């Protein structure tokens, strides 16, 4: 059974017929809706609350607090409900972005993570780095564009389930794709260089080959044996 929580419009997916929100999408304030769920009924919670003073959704709510401390307090209200509803074997995945103020990062994600551990007794076992391939299309002369965000993986007991074998299987599959793409690239790049193509044609062929290699590595093209 998996529960997914979105503070701007709570969504829950459950499998027990005696639980509310079964096979339903429910919109509302999750701080109120989650109170209808019993204790320890969810295997996982995955959520990304509105970021601090980033957007005005026109309905108020989380993200519009007057200061960072109030914002973290709002997040803790959500998080406490998540912890209450989570099974001892479950996990919470919490994604938050940061914000610049007066030219300095506020460290909002990490301040929240520290407060969550201190106030609820959960354990933070992973910080997963979400690398965004298409970050905001801006250029700054005095800092880099923010292209990563943390996803915090919390658990409430040492009995949490962790499927390491599935992770390693996926990792090995990615490595095989990368290796296949590299092998293909070396073979065909040599053919391009040895060909009678003009310099301009060779450059076009190199670019096309690099694009094809990237598609193989992403699994979009299956290499034929």
Image (tube, rainbow, N blue to C red):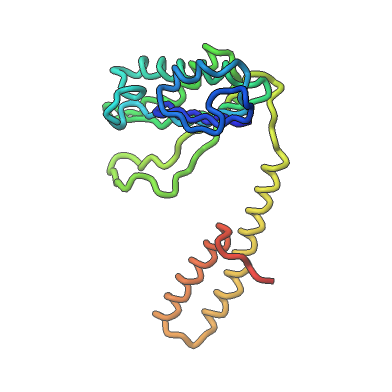
Q: Quadrant of residue 191?
A: bottom right
Number of numbered tags placed on the structure image: 0
Where 38 falls versus 183 (above or below)? Answer: above
Residue 153 x %, y %:
57, 29
User: Quick check: 105 left or right of 148?
Assistant: left
Q: Residue furthest bottom?
A: 196
Q: Is residue 147 left or right of residue 24?
A: left
The percent coordinates of residue 183 (x first, y second) are 63, 67
Q: Is residue 88 left or right of residue 201?
A: right
**Which residue: 50% across, 22% down?**
113
Q: Residue furthest front?
A: 17
Quarter the N terminus occupies? top right
Residue at 40%, 49% (x, y): give it: 134
Considering only vertical position in the picture, is 210 above or below 39? below
**200 lies above or below 149:** below
- Residue at (60%, 15%) from the top-left corner? 39
- Identify the residue shown where x is 26% and y is 27%: 102
Residue 48 percent coordinates (x, y):
45, 31
Q: Viewer-proximal residue, 162 or 143? A: 162
Where is the C terminus found, in terms of image quarters?
Answer: bottom right
Q: Position of residue 10 (x, y in %)?
A: 45, 27
Which of the pair 41/197 is nearer the observer? 41
């Amino acid at each position: 059974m998996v529960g997914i929580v979105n503070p701007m419009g709570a969504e829950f997916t459950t499998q027990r017929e005696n639980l509310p929100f079964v096979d339903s999408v429910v919109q509302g304030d999750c701080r109120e809706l989650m109170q209808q769920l019993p204790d320890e009924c969810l295997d996982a919670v995955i959520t990304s609350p509105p970021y601090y003073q980033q957007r005005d959704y026109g309905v108020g709510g989380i993200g519009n607090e007057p200061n960072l401390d109030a914002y973290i307090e709002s997040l803790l209200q959500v998080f406490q409900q998540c912890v209450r509803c989570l099974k001892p074997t479950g996990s919470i995945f919490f994604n938050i972005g940061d914000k610049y103020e007066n030219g300095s990062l506020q460290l909002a994600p990490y301040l929240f993570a520290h407060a969550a551990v201190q106030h609820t007794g959960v354990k933070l076992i992973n910080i997963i780095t979400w690398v965004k391939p298409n970050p905001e299309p801006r250029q700054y002369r005095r800092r880099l564009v923010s292209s990563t965000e943390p996803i915090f993986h919390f658990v409430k007991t040492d009995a949490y389930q962790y499927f390491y074998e599935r992770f390693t299987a996926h990792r090995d599959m990615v490595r095989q794709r990368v290796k296949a793409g590299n092998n293909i690239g070396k073979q065909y790049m040599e053919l391009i260089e040895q060909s009678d193509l003009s310099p301009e044609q060779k450059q076009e062929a190199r670019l096309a080959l690099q694009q094809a290699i990237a598609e193989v590595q992403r699994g979009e093209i299956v290499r034929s044996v």
